[in-house]
Amino acid sequence: MSAVDLPFDAEEMLTGLRPWIECESPTWDAAAVSRMMDLAARDLSAIGATVETVPGTKGFGTSIRATFPHADQGKPGILVSGHMDTVHPVGTLEKLPFRVQDGKAWGPGIMDMKGGNYVFLEAMRQIARAGLTTPLPVTFLFTPDEEVGTPATRGLIEDAARVQRAVLLPEPALPDGGAVIGRYAIARFDLLTHGRPSHAGWALKDGRSAIAAMARRILEIEAMTTEDCTFSVGVIHAGQWVNCVASECRAEVLSMAKTQADLDRGVAAMLALQGERDGVEFTVTRGVTRPVWEPQPGTMALYDLARDLSAQIGFELSSDRSGGGSDGNFTGAMRVPTLDSIGVRGRGLHTLDEHIEIDSLPERARLAAGLLTRIT
């Protein structure tokens, strides 16, 4: 039996996936993410994997590394790299419960990217049940901090990928169902305005509002957006009392750049904004960065294989570069053959409408099984 013909059942997969979705795991809740890792470790162990728990660092949850029995264990093989953290805070299930309707399934993190991670686990389960083997040893690495730029586990991912023949990322598919063969750079910046406090009712003129200064800076920063380099402020923290002129305001910026040159210009433009205006000091600190990942011959060979397999399964797999960052930025930039966004199809990721198309579960499981049994 060919791996693409394995008997994947959508309802059974939904039953197995549901506990993962109902185990909420927002990035900043290390204990919650670690509970999710324990759940995934249990399921991986149940299908024969040896699972190692990697302690969390920098305040993030644990990671898990799972290896499957193979005659060539320890030699270069296939790395399945995924993250188990989500952007949804604990309690989101009250607004976005797991539910199934009209061929779709909803839930926090079901598209990004627990659904794709589960698809690859199910592929390994069915490969073993059928008595098939993978030509290369397979390792799963699930990490806890991708949604905030992978500040704690980038080294873990790069070390794991460095010795592999291929890296597969079950991130959600592109809107047309396609795979990602390259990604733009992503840079993060921390902003700080430091003003002068005063009583907002008695002595308003004596103060210098860090909030007002930050608001003006935000407009200036977002106006720097072009087709090749974008800037977006997504987080602001400031103030404790409405009757006080705020002396400090913090914000976070996400920048996307299509090329390294675009990224370098964007970083320079951000850093050049620093300085004092009207008694308010403005500081820009560069945060984590995802490097540009340009398509390479090894990646294109993986895509060609995936496209052939998808044709056998009955769908067309397109490919493109993407502006959304992932841990594929790291492995692709290392020139390790990397194929990204081969997870489930769906819509609404990072929103209260996050859902998947149920028929993409067996579809992508067949693709995963085909890749795992054909990559040499």
Image (cartoon, rainbow, N blue to C red):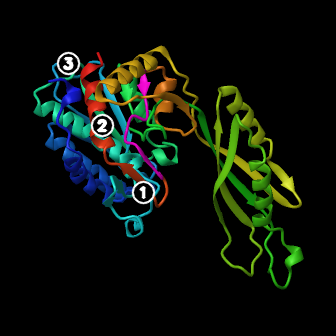
Q: Which residues are magenta?
A: 337-349
Find residue 66 and report its horizontal and vertical position in percent. 25, 36
At a point 27% along the width and 56% down the height, the residue shown is: 18
Q: Is residue 80 visible?
A: yes
Residue 155 rendering spot, x and y as whole percentages: 44, 34
Q: Is 342 within the magenta? A: yes
Indicate the amino acid at tag 1: Pro
Q: Nearer the viewer, residue 144 or 136?
A: 136
Give 211 or 356, whichever is nearer the viewer: 356
Is residue 65 at all visible to an observer of this figure?
Answer: no
Secondary-structure class at tag 1:
loop
Sequence-earlier tag: 3 or 1: 1
Please give the label number shown on residue 26.
Answer: 1
Please report the residue visible at 48 percent of the width from the left and 48 percent of the height from the top.
147
The image's mark for residue 363 is 2
Q: Which residue is mark 3?
A: 72
Across and down, in percent, residue 40 comes to 26, 47
Q: Is residue 148 left or right of 4 when viewed as pictured? A: right
Mark 3: give few (<14), some (14-19) or many (20+) Cα within 10 Å. few
